[in-house]
Structures are given as structure tokens and as C-alpha cells.
Image: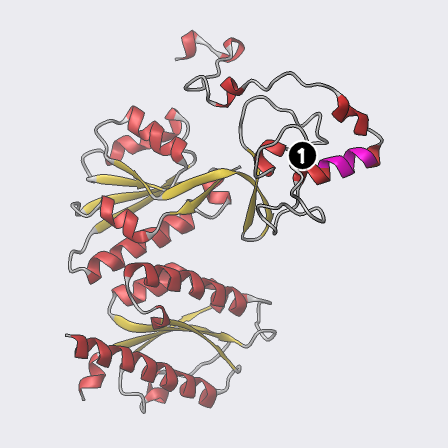
């Protein structure tokens, strides 16, 4: 899922300092699962804003709502009901949601309430770790399912850098060297020779090097996608 | 008498203690006591709202770890206090204005002593604040 983290309250306050009535808008997608932008976090951020503004002597009216998702136009439609009723929206969705609101509702001033961090897994309560960089050209079929792009500090594609010690990364001692793990796992499977294959140079265009990434599936589109 | 001018909010698990305001007559503040079915039910929002509604300090009270009626509710409450404190720090308030207290179940004296200690801590913040002004 997409992992996000609440922005410091002063940064949120700075964006809304001129407003007297705003909406804090959550999303029940990834950010709810990673406890950054669901119903509970909406309530916390809204109350933090109210408290801070009350202490500043500039009380503010803060409405609260959470949509099923903010990354689909149809789920954003209820936002129309807030047009003209609030001066700004603080979205706790990931950057996708904020961008889509900005695209579809240009007259609404929307500000991010979270920083969008990475694609990660929820290893334990309160702990998320990056597992994928979304580069669009998976190589993990060759690396025992472990991604060196996301999980190697140097994004190496051709084996360990030589700086790792005892299976730990030299850049981040608290992290395993993912190439060490790849080698150990392939060795255990008797598939180490797979690493002897010469790979084609990786095509980084799909990682964003070719500009905005768009994916269209004609088999799913009806009426030209309307 | 001036010290009575401020309010403390106690957010408390119903099973931890049943003391009421009259039990705290020695503490010279306005006390607001809100009870919850478990301290694990007390949200960060409740703590922040209490401050916005005028409390100078918020005491979250739950059962001693290991004695929670619902398992680990008071430990959950302690974690939420940390979350609330982080927000206070960010907006420039002393984080200790929201504090977690583990109280022996149904031990009124323990509870009252902890309220007194919290009152003294908040009073110090208030007095320092007045000095700065």
C-alpha cells in the first residue's frame, strides 16, 4: 500500500492561516490502513488545527469528512457539496488524491495534510517498510522476489556493493543487505546460477524517466472511458 | 484564590476509579471528570478537545498495566498520550500538559495523590507563563 505520514501541524497551519472555515478530508484507502489519513486521523488533525488556532486567538471552523477513496473521480463527487461552503480543503489522502482534487476541482484550494512516503508493507502494528519503488519494470522474478531497487540503498542491479558486513547494509546498519539475502536465498534453492545470466539494461523510462506514466487498457474502456 | 481560575480535565476509565469531584476538594482547581468504558477508548481527539475547551492540563487515568479490565486498554491509552504530546510539542505547548497516570484500581488515595501531583505540575507551567507575560 501507499504509506504516508502526517505533516507537522505548523506546516498545515501555514497553508490555511488566512481561512476561517476549512474541510479536513480523509481517505479510507491506503492512508487509512497506514493510520495517516482515515477517519480517526481526520478527527485528530481537525482537533489539532482547532486547538492551535484557538491558542493563536484566531478560531477556525473545521469540518470533517472521509471519502471511500480520493483517487477515483466518482468517489470525489461528494466534494461538490463542499464547494462554496469551505475556503480550503486539507486532504489527508496520498499525493494522488490531492492531485486529482486539484485536477477535477480547480476552484477548490486543496493542501496536503500528509507527506506521501513510499509503497510498503505493514510488518507489525505501527511499523511500515518499503518494499517496492513502482519502477514499472519488475525484476523480482530473477531475485527470489526481493527487490534490490527498493531495498538496496544503492539500487544496485548486479550484486552486493562489497561494503556490507555480516549481511547488514553498510549505509543502514539496521537494514539487511538485500543482495546478501538474494544470494543466500537463491543458493538455498539451488538457483544461484540464475545470477550468471546477463540482463538487458533496465529500461528506466517506465520508472518515470519518460515523463508522466499513463496506463490505458482498451479492454476495460467503454464509451471512450466516459 | 487565583489558582482556582484554571481547569484540569481528568479522562478516566470507569473501572479504574469512581472518585468524584467532591473527593478532590483539596485540589484548588476546577476539575472536569469524564469517564470512559476503558482508558483504551480515550482518543487523542478527546485529549486535545479538553485543552481547546479550556483545560490547562489533561490527566488520562487508567488501570495499572496487567490489571486492565479489557486486557491492554491502559497501555493503549499511554501510547495515545504520546501521540497527543507530539502534537502539543509541534504547536508550542508543554507536552506534559497531557499526561498518563496508571492508578491502582479503586484506590481513591492513590488517585487523589496523582491528581494533586499533576495539579502542581500544571500550576508551575501556569505560573511560569504568567512570569513570561
Q: Between B133 and A225, which is closer to the camera in this rendering?
A: B133
Q: Position of residue A155 (x, y in %)?
A: 58, 33
> Label 1: few (<14), some or many (≥20) within 10 Å?
many
**Residue A206 in picture, x, y percent from top left:** 51, 19
Q: Residue at x 32, y 69 (%)?
A: B94
Quadrant of the rendered image containing residue B100: bottom left
Q: Is residue B84 magenta?
A: no
Quadrant of the image occupied by residue B114: bottom left
* Residue A80 at x, y percent in the picture: 27, 30
Colouring of the image: secondary structure
- Residue in the picture at 32% in, 73% down: B57
Q: Is residue A186 magenta?
A: yes
Disc 1: which chain? A
Q: Which residues are magenta?
A: A182-187
**Residue that carries the numbered disc 1 in the rendered image:** A146
> Is residue A28 something that shows in the picture?
no
Q: Is residue A188 above or below residue A209?
A: below
Q: Does dot 1 land on a helix, a strand or a loop?
A: loop
Q: What predominant SS class does the magenta segment belong to?
A: helix
Q: How many marks?
A: 1
Looking at the rendered image, the quarter that the C terminus of chain A falls into is top left
Q: Position of B123 compared to A148: left or right?
A: left
Q: Residue at x 57, y 44 (%)?
A: A129
**One can see residue A3 in this view:** yes
- Furthest toward the right, the residue is A190
Coordinates of residue A57 in the picture (x, y in percent)? 15, 60
Q: Is residue A67 left or right of residue A175?
A: left
Amino acid at each position: 500500500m501507499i504509506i504516508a505520514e502526517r505533516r507537522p501541524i505548523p506546516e498545515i497551519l501555514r497553508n490555511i492561516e488566512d481561512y476561517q472555515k476549512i474541510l479536513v478530508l480523509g481517505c479510507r484507502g491506503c492512508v487509512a490502513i497506514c493510520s495517516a489519513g482515515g477517519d480517526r486521523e481526520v478527527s485528530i488533525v481537525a482537533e489539532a488545527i482547532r486547538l492551535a488556532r484557538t491558542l493563536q486567538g484566531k478560531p477556525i471552523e473545521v469540518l470533517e469528512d472521509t471519502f471511500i477513496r480520493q483517487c477515483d473521480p466518482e468517489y470525489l463527487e461528494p466534494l461538490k457539496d463542499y464547494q462554496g461552503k469551505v475556503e480550503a480543503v486539507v486532504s489527508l489522502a496520498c499525493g494522488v488524491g490531492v492531485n486529482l482534487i486539484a485536477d477535477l476541482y480547480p476552484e477548490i484550494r486543496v493542501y496536503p495534510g500528509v507527506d506521501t512516503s513510499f509503497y510498503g508493507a505493514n510488518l507489525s502494528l505501527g511499523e511500515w517498510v518499503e518494499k517496492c519503488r513502482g519502477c514499472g519494470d519488475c525484476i523480482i522474478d530473477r531475485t527470489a522476489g526481493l527487490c534490490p531497487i527498493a531495498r538496496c540503498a544503492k539500487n544496485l542491479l548486479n550484486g552486493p556493493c562489497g561494503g556490507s558486513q555480516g549481511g547488514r547494509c553498510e549505509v543502514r546498519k539496521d537494514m539487511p543487505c538485500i543482495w546478501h539475502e538474494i544470494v543466500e536465498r537463491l543458493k538455498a534453492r539451488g538457483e544461484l546460477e540464475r545470477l550468471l545470466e546477463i540482463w538487458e539494461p533496465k529500461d528506466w523510462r517506465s520508472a518515470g524517466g519518460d515523463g508522466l506514466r499513463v496506463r490505458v487498457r482498451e479492454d476495460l474502456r467503454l464509451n471512450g472511458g466516459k | 484564590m487565583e489558582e482556582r481560575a484554571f481547569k484540569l480535565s481528568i479522562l478516566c476509565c470507569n473501572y479504574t476509579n469512581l472518585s468524584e469531584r467532591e473527593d478532590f476538594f483539596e485540589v484548588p482547581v476546577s476539575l472536569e471528570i469524564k469517564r470512559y468504558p476503558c482508558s483504551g477508548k480515550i482518543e487523542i481527539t478527546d485529549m486535545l478537545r479538553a485543552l481547546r475547551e479550556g483545560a490547562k492540563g489533561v490527566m488520562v487515568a487508567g488501570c495499572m498495566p496487567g490489571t486492565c479490565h479489557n486486557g491492554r486498554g491502559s497501555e493503549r491509552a499511554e501510547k495515545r498520550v504520546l501521540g497527543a504530546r507530539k502534537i502539543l510539542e509541534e504547536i508550542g505547548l508543554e507536552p506534559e500538559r497531557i499526561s498518563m497516570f496508571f492508578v491502582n484500581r479503586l484506590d481513591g488515595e492513590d488517585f487523589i495523590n496523582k491528581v494533586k501531583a499533576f495539579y502542581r505540575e500544571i500550576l508551575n507551567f501556569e505560573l511560569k507563563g504568567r512570569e513570561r507575560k
